[in-house]
Amino acid sequence: MDIQIIGVGRLGSQVAFCSLMFLRPDVIALHDIKNLEGDVMDLEHAKQGYKYLHGKPCNTEIKTGLIPADVIVIAAGETRSSERTNEEWMEMNKKHLTKIIDNIKTKPDTKIIIATNLVLELTEWAQNKYPQYNFFHAEDEIMKYRNGVELGIEILKTKGYTNFGPSMSIVEKIKQLSS
């Protein structure tokens, strides 16, 4: 399985890390407006720890740029701010998603997971605007991981806590869509 992650900030980098540890994809491709050298180095370093956790080497290839992928996770967009309304925030992120979706590379059955807030509203908007694509969100899985309580020690194996719930809910959605 090839996974494309667009937007490699707090959430996108955590999704990449959790995907590497729990999904063992063939390829993880990162795309962002920022320089991704440090993010790639972090994931390459995590591959070394993978062998310790799972008892076998990690063969996932880490790439940068846009690729035709089985799953695309869009985590790019404007962050929350008390200085704008939800409507303004929604319009800003619609503009970002339009630029992204107009440039993605897909396979015939690519699944696209929207992780940009406002998630439910933007997923519905994307489904209506781009009916040729298969859009999903992971909001229905998020409560399972919100506090990490159900996973016990597993939470200690991840790279950060802040986005653990959302990133693991996206990993669960990828598992669900791939089965």
Image (tube, rainbow, N blue to C red):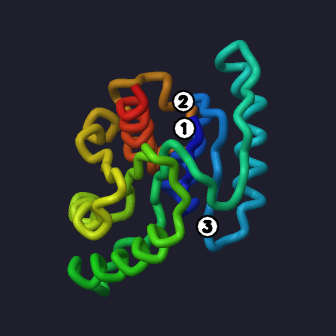
Mark 2: secondary structure: loop
Give the side of residue 139 with respect to residue 57, left or right: left
CB contact under 8 Å: marks 3 and 1: no
Q: Between residues 172 and 152, which one lies in front from this camera angle?
A: 172
Is residue 82 placed above or below 12 in the rendered structure?
below
Can residue 109 be seen here? The reply is yes
Q: Give the mark nearer the N terminus: 1 vs 2.
A: 1
Please state the horizontal and vertical placement of residue 84, each as a whole percent of the image. 28, 85
Badge 2: few (under 14), some or many (20 or more) residues near its Cα, within 10 Å? some
Q: For mark 1, what is the residue?
A: 18
Mark 3: secondary structure: loop
Which disc is residue 32 wearing?
3
* Residue type beneath disc 1: Cys
Alpha carbon separation for disc pair 1 and 2: 8 Å
Q: Give the mark nearer the N terminus: 2 vs 3.
A: 2
Classify residue 156 by image quadrant.
top right
* Residue type beneath disc 2: Leu
Q: For mark 2, what is the residue?
A: 23
Residue drawn 66% across and 20% down? 53
